[in-house]
């Protein structure tokens, strides 16, 4: 198994930053596109546990678009072979002393790279 195969790493990195731009811009269509459309997809958030693409879509549709801008730091993207990757990052938001943490598992499916599991948490 090749860790961080250059072409695979570049593809996942592009998908990760596409997700980030969609997140801060509240582009729910792109956010939805980047999650695996399956009921086995999991997103454990800072205040919610979402099981399945339907719950993730409902959460995104109801979420306020205000205050989504953030700064990333300590981002680590690691690929395992050509079909699996883990993306971990910390983030901060202006006006908050909390540090957010985000981790995503990405899998290359026939439709492209998709998030199959995600976790978001906050710490003081």
Image (cartoon, helix red, strand yellow):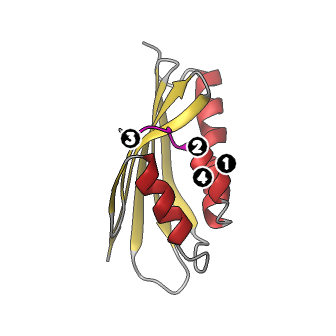
Q: What residue is drawn where x is 59% and y is 34%?
A: 12
Q: For residue 6, which numbered disc appears in the image? A: none
Image: 20 above or below 42: below
Query: Would you say the residues marked 4 and 2 are in contact, meaning their CB atoms lie under 8 Å apart?
Result: yes
In this rendering, position of residue 118 left or right of residue 10: left
Out of 78 and 60, give the one closest to the viewer. Answer: 60
- Residue where numbered disc 2 is placed: 34
The tag earlier along the polypeptide, 2 or 1, is 1
Q: Residue at x 64, y 31 (%)?
A: 11
The residue where tag 1 is placed is 18
Which of discs 4 and 3 lies nearer the camera? The answer is 3
Q: CA distance from mark 3 to mark 1?
A: 23 Å
Tell me how far mark 4 sits from mark 2, CA to CA.
5 Å
The one of 81 and 57 positioned closer to us in this rendering: 57
**Which-is-in-front pick, marks 2 and 1?**
2
Quadrant occupied by the C terminus: bottom left
Question: Magenta stretch?
Answer: 34-38
Query: Residue 39 shows which numbered tag?
Result: 3
Q: Residues within 10 Å of mark 2 (few under 14, many from 20)?
A: many
Q: Are there few (<14), some (14-19), or many (20+) residues within 10 Å of tag 1?
A: some
* Residue farthest along the bottom direction in this orientation: 95
Q: Is residue 94 above or below residue 84?
A: below
Q: Is residue 101 magenta?
A: no
The residue lying at 40 percent from left, 60 percent from top is 101
Q: Is residue 89 visible?
A: no
Classify the position of the N terminus by image quarter: top left
Q: Are marks 2 and 1 in contact (CB under 8 Å)?
A: yes
Can you identify the residue that label 4 sits on?
A: 31
Q: Which is more toward the observer, 50 or 24?
A: 50
Relative placement, left or right, of 16 versus 1 is right
Name the N-terminal-most of marks 1 and 4: 1
């Amino acid at each position: 198994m090749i860790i961080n195969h250059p072409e695979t790493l570049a593809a996942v990195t592009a998908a990760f930053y596409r997700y980030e731009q969609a997140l801060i811009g509240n582009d729910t269509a792109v956010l939805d596109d980047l999650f695996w459309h399956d009921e086995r997809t999991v997103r454990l958030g800072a205040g919610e546990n979402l099981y399945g693409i339907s719950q993730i879509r409902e959460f995104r549709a109801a979420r306020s678009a205000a205050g989504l801008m953030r700064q990333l730091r300590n981002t680590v993207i690691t690929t395992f072979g050509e079909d699996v990757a883990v993306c971990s990052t910390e983030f901060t938001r202006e006006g908050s002393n909390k540090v957010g943490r985000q981790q995503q598992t990405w899998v290359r499916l026939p439709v492209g790279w998709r998030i199959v599991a995600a976790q978001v948490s906050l710490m003081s």
